[in-house]
Image: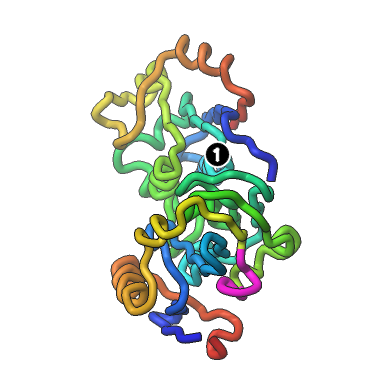
Amino acid sequence: MEDFEGKKILVIQTHGVETPTRTYSPLFYAMAAAAMEIEVMVWFTMNGTNQLKKGEAEKVQLVKDSNVNLKTMLEMAMDSEVELRVCQQSLELWDMKVEDLIDGVEIMGATSIIELSLTYDHVMYF
Amino acid sequence: MSHEKVKGCVILKDLHYNIKNNTWVRVIDDNTVVIGMTDIAQSLAGSLLHAKTKSTGTARRLGKPIATVESGKYVGPVKSPVAGEITKVNEALASDAGLINRSPYNDGWIVEMKADNLSADLADMVTGDAAIAAYSEKIEQDGIECAGVEGADTY
């Protein structure tokens, strides 16, 4: 396997709990990138933001009777050193405050994410 | 080769285990080791579709990936339990990642490494009865069950 250490990927997630089938894959790709020693950040914006509200991700389960739900996917991603960031402006869309966010997620503004995206090697948009 | 089964999970007594990363180490000589995923690790990962090893000659620090493995429900690194250089990789895994599921301790080995300081790394692992005890506790705590691996009874 080629050595990708030092590369950076930004994953942008715009889908939320109302479309469960669109929630797992971005995190799966993010974890794959992290396993390949790529620095990876998932940026939640638009509808993507609502899965980060405490108590919401637990309700999203793709496979019945599985012990994995969207909350565990988010936790696994963080355990894999995937950084999770949320768009400050989109919090208002969902009437969310800082204290509503699950632990481990940091807030960033639009200009910060634009700056960051210019320093990343690749952007995956979902 | 002495082994025990805990909830169907095979644990070989003559291997050294890094419990946290769920990897095993077979000592070949003073500083050469073969490394793989445990039966517990492969059971948790599920049927593997892809396994990509790092290249021969790659230097690894403790805990850095020696491979990535991927199933329908899991993707993650296999973290090196020793620091050193990869001297050989299991080429068969490129076309048949399921070898890790079927034979985690033999045909499904992942890499061979030349360790920088093997005795120090081994000091942080468990072997023999201590490995059985440590894994028994983990298996119980995490509610793990294994389906069994090929030829386990011949170990």
Percent coordinates x, y for residue A99 in the rendering: 24, 29
Between residues A26 and A117, which one lies in front from this camera angle?
A117
Q: Is residue B29 covered in magenta?
A: no
Q: Residue A105: image x %, image y %?
A: 35, 31
**Which residue occupies the foreground of this view, B29 or A97?**
B29
Task: Specify the quadrant of the image occupied by residue A56.
Answer: top left
Residue labelled with disc 1: A37
Residue A64 placed where, x, y %? 47, 62
SS for tag 1? loop
Subunit bearing disc 1 = A
Give amino acid for label 1. Answer: Glu
Residue extending farthest to the front is: B30
Q: Answer with left or right where residue B100 lies relative to residue A77.
A: right
Residue at screen point 75% across, 61% down:
B95
Horizontally, is A94 left or right of B80 in the view?
left
Asked if residue A122 is positioned above or below residue B103 in the image, the reply reads above
- What residue is drawn where x is 46% and y is 58%? B118
Q: Which residues are magenta?
A: B102-109
Q: Which residue lies most toward the left here?
A: A99
Q: How many marks?
A: 1
Please name whichever residue, A109 or A5, is drawn nearer the observer in this view of the structure: A5
**Left/right of residue A57 with respect to residue B26 in the rendered view:** left
Residue pictured at 50% horizontal, 59% vertical: A63
Residue B101 visible (yes or no): yes
